[in-house]
Amino acid sequence: MKKALIIVSIFISFLSICNAQNTQIDSLEKLVNYSKDLNKIAFWKLEICKIRYKESAVDMSTYLDELHSLLNLIDNDNTYIEICRFSGSVFRSLGQYENALKYDFLGLKRAEQSENISLEARLLNNIGINFYRSTNFNKALDYYLLAEQKFLEIDDIFGTGDCYNNIGMTYDDLGKLDSALFYYERAQNIYEQYNDKDAISDILNNKAGVYYKIGDFEKVLDLAMKSLEILEELGDEDKVASTLINIGMIYYSLGKYNKAVEYEERGLSIAEKNSRYPYIRFGYKSLADAYAGIGDYQKAFSAQKKYAAANDTIFNRNMAQAISEMQAKYETEKIEQQVKLLKTENQLAVIQINKGRILIFAFLIVIILGSIIAIILVRQNKYKSRLNKDLESKNTELSLLNATKNKFFAIVSHDIKNPLSGFKAITSSLDESFHEMSEDNVKKYIKLLRNSSEQLNELLKGLLSWAALLSSNKEIDIKEVQLSGVINEIVKLVNDDCVSKGIELNVNTCDLPKVYVDENMLLAIVRNIVSNAIKFTPSGGKIEISLSHQNNRNMVLIEDTGIGIEQHDINKLFRIDADTKKIGNSKEKGAGLGLILAKEMADRCNIEIDVKSEFGKGTTFALSIPVNNNLNVKNRSLYSR
């Protein structure tokens, strides 16, 4: 009798709550119907949606569509942002993370425009949660870190603590366990400062999970025990049961099977009292393992049977819940349709007469509105995408300009300064002590002056060529060129340098189709590479130049037996922002412009350059040059790459 009275009381309370909610919804709908202020209508509709959202069986899609149709019609920032946040939370709960991201980003954009930092922080955190739940952990981390900055900016301690916890969880899933522990500690400090015991318990469990991955089970046990103490103080039986079962599993990992049995059974007694079947299932599975560890296989078998029974119960409950939700949804929709159809007899008659026309008209309106919204969204996305691309292009151009400036100043401050300093020192010595010097010393100083002047001359020629190439607006002169003729001309130019340095130069040319290229640029490219080979090949070494034809392109191979290049330095050869003086261990260092010029000219002529090298054994440069003229070559600049 007493049990029946309790059930009746609960049922009456439930009906009272439902009646109160329906009364509140009716009052808000009346306000909506009598108002013409779109901002107020949107706000009231949002409140109606929040009330309906608490009814888990209600399908929110129709109500959300009504809210979204008002977004572009209202000018109240707070209402706009709250609609976006609510939409994001609904889609997030349904696992529809793309839709959740869409509305969280819309809300973030309006929050940034209205300079509402508090809402910016929360929306950035929500976006991080969307990426985290869709397992895009790197993206999640980016937005959590942005949210952290905003929370710190407005001194929102609680928001900062939650953000630290989220960052810790993300680092945890990325396998960066030290970083995870660092942020868990920061979150715990904040929660302890405000004595938020529930949050402290969660953090302790998160830290325990990290130490479990590390394999430090003693530390895991210590943290789990501290968490259990807090949960028992709070009286949260669900979490107490879960923690007890987890502690049993830790004892099992430590080989303390009797302790494992003790804690598993304590946790199971609470879980069974509250009919928490997920915990029951997990607990009996762990208990069976613990009994098996002790050697009590009869009890292990009994626990395994209970695990299987709990598994079946969970499956049946899930099925029943799914059927119940479908039935409730059907009944709710059925009742709503009946209410709409039975408002008045006159309305019913009109609807019955014009049903076909209304349906067709409504269908057309939906299609038109949907098309308009789709077009607007597509245009907005295209415009945003175009702006992002333009910004990225400008950033790249700015980086290259900055690198070019830095390279120029480095050359001027170092490479020009050194020979000029040499000039000054040598000429000062000659001026002050000319009559006291022997003829051999005078010749020695004159040779040093000559070397400095040649070094300075080469450097200035390189700088002028570089400047001319960067500022040139003329089309390049593409024409048919006999490749073997270019190679022979280069051999004549560098032969004396090879002889004076004692380097063997071998050339293997053959009849190949003519290439389409700017002859002067090709000459400069090959000469720069060959000169580089001579510079970095010691006396007694060998350089070989050979020609071949592959895949409708002519190939030029320039191989040397020089000092070679480390693999990680190869990509620096053609970069304006790289310090080429640190590449290799040769004493012959240049300004690093030769190969940069060669690469720029190669890009303009559609010539591909590939470099292979083995440190200490030599380097091979391979040039691939087109042999047809359908390449649509354009005048490119250094900043177009």
Image: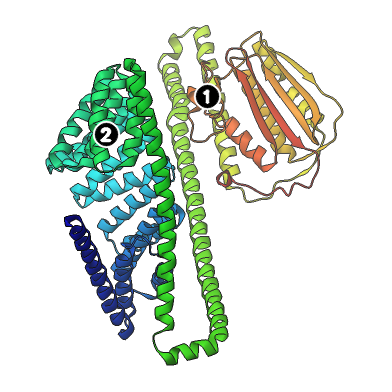
Label 1 near label 2: C-beta < 8 Å? no
Nearest to the observer: residue 291 or residue 228: 291
Q: Can residue 59 be seen in this view?
A: no
* Residue at the outermost bottom position: 346
Label 2: state its secondary structure: helix
- Left or right of residue 576, residue 105 in this image: left
Q: What residue sits right under mark 2 in the picture?
A: 268
* Residue at the outermost front position: 1
Instruction: Name the residue type under label 1.
Output: His
**How busy is the neighbourhood of tag 2: few (under 14 within 10 Å), some, or many (20 plus)?**
many
- Left or right of residue 184, residue 552 in this image: right
- Left or right of residue 197, residue 59 in this image: right
Residue 73: image location, x then y, percent: 39, 75
Mark 2–mark 1 distance (CA, rounded to whole Å): 58 Å
Residue 440: image location, x then y, percent: 53, 7
Label 1: state its secondary structure: helix
Mark closer to the chain start, 2 or 1: 2
- Left or right of residue 496, residue 201 in this image: left
Q: Residue 568 carries which label?
A: 1
Query: In the displayed structure, would residue 123 be above or below residue 415?
Result: below
The quarter of the rendered structure image containing the C terminus is top right
Query: In the displayed structure, would residue 637 be above or below residue 558?
Result: below
Query: In the displayed structure, would residue 336 be above or below residue 112?
Result: below
